[in-house]
Structure formats: structure tokens, C-alpha cells
Amino acid sequence: MRLPLSCAALAVALLAACQPVRPAAPAATPVAATAEAAVPADDNLNAVLWVQRTAEYQAAATQTYRAAAALLDRALAEPHWDALVPSERDNAGHGLKPAVVLDIDETVLDNSPYQARLVRDGLEYSDPTWDAWVEERKAKPVPGVLEFARAASERGITMVYISNRAVHLKQATLDNLRAVGLPVADDSVFLGLGTVVEGCEQHGSEKDCRRRLAGRQYRVLMQFGDQLGDFVHIDANTFEGRQRLLEEYDDWFGERWWMLPNPTYGSWEPAAFGNSWKQSRETRRAAKRAALDVAP
Ligand SMILES: [Mg+2]
């Protein structure tokens, strides 16, 4: 799906998924005990509820796609308009067929029911539960994406999906995309995790090789994602490293790059605990609490 899990980390995640919900650790002081006890392990409750039930989420996603659609004609008209960073392009770009590159999860498909199940059951992400959800083919479209897709299709722009859904989930994913009405020109527009790209060595779940592959065939007018790594290679997954990238490409957001809101998960989360999923859930949670700005 989306988490850069190593095999070891995956084993830990799977183990955690098989264990009963662990109660919050007893706190040392009455004040801390109150705060800890009031927050069970499902920190995702507010985030998932926000995505599933609020007008605010729908408005944020819709306005993003609407604003992007309004720029399509300008992007098409400017022959050197390109949404790939120069280091990921092997050619001049202009003259190629136009495309937009989109991540899938929480960018075009809404998997919040899967997240809601994790909250309900007190579990964390695991590959088996994720694969089972994908096979259900029940994800709905993110608000606004169908209208954007129509605008792109009317202009002859191909939708290319670069996703960290593994390639063995390709058929279920294509079925789900088609079922909700998203354009799938042919099976080649799905570039899942595990796609082999000639002349490019892929690192983990980073998408740079697959972006490079898309660029060999298309001029990429825009990119859409819910995580920074959907747009550009992340060298250092720390809050500071991510901030540097944001500043470097600040002008591209709202023009060539479009970020969808996703407070429920993402590569931003492990940045808070040193990218070590091997740590216990409590340790990771403590690191996230420690990263909060409480304005001393
Ligand atoms: Mg995503």
C-alpha cells in the first residue's frame, strides 16, 4: 500500500496485528494518568472521522481538483510545462503525449473504511488486512476526482496511476478504478510497487523510477498525491528534510503539484520516530507526543 516497511518492520506490524489490544501503560502521575487514559490506542479516530463524515474534508479535496482542472488548458498550451523534477526526466519532455500522474490511495480512491476497521478493532496496518480490503474493490472515489478526470479526458490527457499498491493487487485495483468511473486507458497506466524500470534501481517504495518511466512516454502536466513522496524523491525522511523539499518546490504546489488532505497515515508519521517501525506502539506514540509543539 504505502508504508515503507522493511521485512523486519513488517514482521513486527504483523505480530502487532495478531495481538489483542494493549491497554495504555499506567502513568506515573495522576495528571499524566488522566491524559493517557483518555486517549486509547486508536489515535486515528478523529482523523478517520474527519475524512468520512465532514464537509470540510469534501471541500478540501474538491477545491484541489477543481483548481487543478482550471489550469489544464494553460498547462497544455505551454510546451515546456512539466511536473517532473529535471533529475527524473530522461528526455526533453515537450512533444510527448500529455498525461497527469496520480497516486491512488487517498488521492483518487478513499480507503477510509479500511482505516475505520483498524480503529474499531484496535489494530495497525498489516499487508494481509490491506490486501483483503483491496480485493473487496469497495473504495470510493475521492471527492472531486471524477470531475477532474472528465476534464482531463475531454482534453486528451492520459491518467497514469503510480501507486504503492503492489503489482499483485493490479487487477483488483484496475477493477476498482473502473467501477467508480475513473479512466483507465489500458492496463499499462497502473505502475504499482514492484514495477521493473529499465536503467533505474528502485529503492523501497520510492516512486522516482516509476515517475521516470512515465516521463519516457508522456509530458507530465501535473502530479497528484497525498504524501510528499508522491511528487519527489525524499532523501532524508525527517521533518527537517521534508520541510527543505517543500521549500525547494514551493512554487510548484497549486500549479504542477496538487496535495490531497490525508491526516490518517503517511510517510510523515515515521519521521516522528526515526523511521523505526520496530519500536513498540507505545514508544512510537511517545515520540509523536514529544514532537508536538506546545509553545513553551
Ligand atoms: Mg496515497
Image: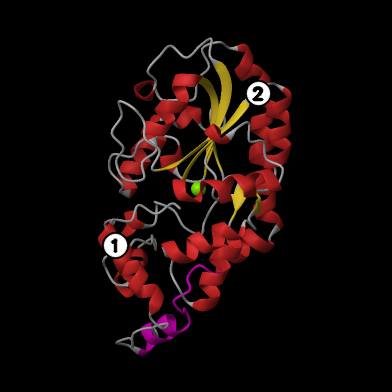
Residue 263 visible to the viewer = yes
Q: Is residue 183 positioned above or below 13 on the image? A: above
Quadrant of residue 241 within the rendered picture: top left
Give the percent coordinates (x, y) of residue 138. 65, 58
- Nearer-the-camera pick, 238 or 234: 234
Give the percent coordinates (x, y) of residue 141. 67, 49
Q: What's the amino acid at mark 1? A: Ala
Residue at the image position 63 percent from the left and 12 percent from the top: 77
Residue stretch rendered in magenta on the structure: 30-45
Look at mark 2 in the image and give the residue it sits on. 72
Q: What's the amino acid at mark 2? A: Leu
Q: Is residue 273 positioned above or below 198 on the image? A: below
Give the percent coordinates (x, y) of residue 206. 36, 41
Q: Does the residue labelled 1 lie within 8 Å of ligand 1?
A: no
**Which of the numbered marks, if any, corresponds to residue 9?**
1
Q: What element carries label 2?
A: helix
Classify residue 205 as left or right of residue 225. left
